[in-house]
Image: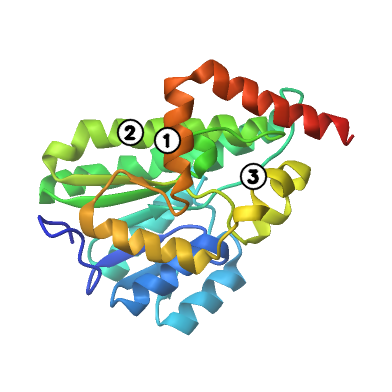
Amino acid sequence: MSGNGGFELAGAGVVVTGAGHGIGEALARRFAAAGARVVVNDLDAKAAEAVAEEIGAGALPGDAADPDGVEALITGARAALGEIDLYCANAGTAVGGSEQAADADWERSWQVNVMSHVRASRMLTGPWLERGRGHWISTVSAAGLLTMLDAAPYAVTKHAALAFAEWLAVTYQHRGITVQALCPQGVRTDMLGGTGAAGDLLLRPTAIEPSQVAETVVEALADGRFLILPHPETAQMYQHRATDTDRWLRGLGRVQQQLDATR
């Protein structure tokens, strides 16, 4: 529950999407350890159920990006929890490629990385506004603040996810809804393994464990900061991007040339 002292996990009703693996699993485990009543969602039903059983949580597997899936998840979570105090829109998909990526890849990225957030918020904000409190966390990734080479669908839709989180914060913060955006760089998950040469160059050297991300989130819940940055250097990169955009783009362009030279 939210208040002047931050969010109190003990006893809170929490939903984490994409919680069968990776960051979502780490979040679910950490929240449950702090006394939260957790609902674990994942497209991988077996993984969701296994995590839920291990941490004493409920499992509501399904597609958190599909309109019917979102409705089933939130309706089921409310029935189990009474109310959802914290919703972690963590499920995501990392599709690589350029502007030449197939329309289906662009569409799936849009549905999972952006529209899943929009659809969930439609069902959450009304009750939260009536209560005068609610808490939302979007897992955006540093790609939403910066970019990701060789992954246009991912970078573009993560920028959109950040923009939507910003919009939610600006629109509802004065009415009791706290919105935060989780923006890690490399995290040692299956998703990192699919980032290819760009990931090897940009992400792997500073990659951290999902449990470290979860600890940073718990710390951020205490003060409600908008940007949750498990990699502190992300803030400096974001500042450089904003204050000298041309220099920033030239620097990344040189990295892109390195990647091109390896092909």
Q: Residue at x 61, y 73 (%)?
A: 46
Disc 1 target residue: 162
Disc 3 target residue: 94
Disc 2 residue type (three-letter):
Glu
194 relative to 80, above or below: above
Using the numbered discs, state the Cα–Cα distance from disc 2 to disc 3 in whole angstroms: 21 Å
180 vs 193, left or right, is left
On the question of residue 24 being in view, the answer is yes
Q: Position of residue 139 (x, y in %)?
A: 45, 49
Disc 1 residue type (three-letter):
Leu
Q: Position of residue 213 (x, y in %)?
A: 46, 61
Q: Secondary structure at mark 1?
A: helix
Give the mark nearer the N terminus: 3 vs 1: 3
Q: Nearer the viewer, residue 13 or 126?
A: 13
Disc 2 target residue: 166
On the question of residue 161 being in view, the answer is no
Q: Quadrant of residue 214?
A: bottom left
Q: Quadrant of residue 254?
A: top right
Q: Residue at x 18, y 58 (%)?
A: 6
158 vs 217, left or right, is right
Disc 3 residue type (three-letter):
Ala
Q: Nearer the viewer, residue 241 or 65?
A: 241
44 vs 230, left or right, is right
Q: Quadrant of residue 239?
A: top left
Using the numbered discs, state the Cα–Cα distance from disc 2 to disc 1 in whole angstroms: 6 Å
